[in-house]
Image: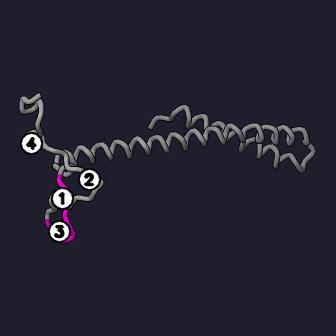
Amino acid sequence: MMITREQMATAAASATFAGGLVAFVANAAGPRKRLACSGLRLALSAVPLVIITRARRSQQQVQDSATTNHREGYWLGLNHAARGLLLTPPPDSHGQGATAQDAPDHLSVVPSPKNAEGPIKGKP
């Protein structure tokens, strides 16, 4: 498995935030107030980096999901076209094959090339 640049950025931002928070908590009650202040500044400066890296990863996952859905829809369409399901109307309520006149309004019957008139049969 290969580690990507985005994963490294997310890990670095999260480690910086956690390290600053640990430095703040460990030194807040002790005599090193300056180290606690530096730890708090480090943790607060890492928050935008953590947010940006998480947002980029989320956008990438959404894009990957959309690409997968598009590809699956494309293959489903090809499968339906290959099986002839796009040109046949759906069956009626009794499970029998419906005719073209029984098809709902949103479905249209596409004429086959052998029934079409025009340039295919040599007519202008």
Q: Nearer the viewer, mark 2 or mark 1?
A: 1
Q: Which residue is mark 2?
A: 107
Q: Give the image location of residue 114, x and y in percent.
A: 7, 40
Label 2 to label 1: alpha-carbon separation? 10 Å
Marks 4 and 3 close (CB-CB < 8 Å): no
Q: Nearer the viewer, residue 57 or 42?
A: 57
Query: Badge 2: how crowded within 10 Å, few (<14), some, or many (20+)?
Result: few
What residue did someone put label 1 on? 101
Nearer the viewer's eye, disc 2 or disc 3?
2
- CB atoms of marks 1 and 4 within 8 Å: no
**In the rendered image, which quarter contains the N terminus?**
top left
Q: How many marks?
A: 4
Horizontal relation, residue 75 to residue 50: left or right = left
Q: Secondary structure at mark 2?
A: loop
State which tag comes first along the sequence, 4 or 3: 3
How far apart are the two marked residues, 2 and 4, measured between alpha carbons? 19 Å
Marker disc for residue 95: 3
Marks 3 and 1, the one that precedes in the sequence: 3
Is 90 within the magenta?
A: yes
- The disc labelled 1 sits on which kind of residue? Gln
- Circle 4 residue: 115
Point out the stretch of residues depicted in magenta.
88-96
